[in-house]
Amino acid sequence: MPFKKNNTLGFLPKDTIALDRKPLTIKLRPGIREQVISIPQWTNELREVIEAWVQTKLDQTDEL
């Protein structure tokens, strides 16, 4: 059953910025995936680490 417009029970995102529809996939060494998934809130933490890493790398290339 679809939700009616302007309902109060629908899905609300946690962030103000929507996530990209295309996921980033990487291959890891055996056992790492299970260790990462066992960490609470791992997706949010990993997103923050990746964003900081990308910004650092971009800043380094701008200095050259």
Image (cartoon, rainbow, N blue to C red):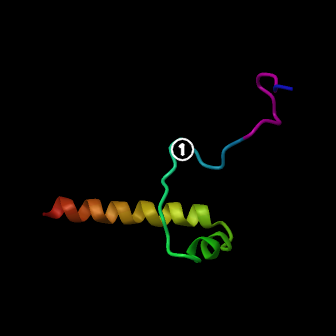
Q: In which quarter of the image is residue 19?
A: top right
Q: Is residue 10 above or below residue 36?
A: above
4 part of magenta stretch: yes
Q: Name the spot of residue 46 as percent of width and height, x first.
A: 53, 65
Q: Which amino acid does label 1 sit on?
A: Ile
Q: Is residue 56 above or below residue 9?
A: below
Q: In which quarter of the image is residue 3?
A: top right
User: Which residue occupies 65% across, 66% down?
Assistant: 41
Question: For this rendering, which residue is in front, 51 or 24?
Answer: 24
Q: Name the spot of residue 50 as percent of width and height, x first.
A: 44, 63
Q: In this view, does 10 lie above or below 6?
A: below
Mark 1 falls on what kind of element? loop
Q: Name the spot of residue 43 as percent of width and height, x first.
A: 60, 62
Residue for badge 1? 17
45 part of magenta stretch: no
Question: For this rendering, which residue is in front, 19 or 24?
Answer: 24
User: Which residue occupies 66% across, 44% down?
Assistant: 13
> Which span of residues is magenta-colored?
3-11
Q: How crowded is mark 1: few (under 14 residues within 10 Å), some or many (20 or more)?
A: few
Magenta stretch: dominant secondary structure: loop
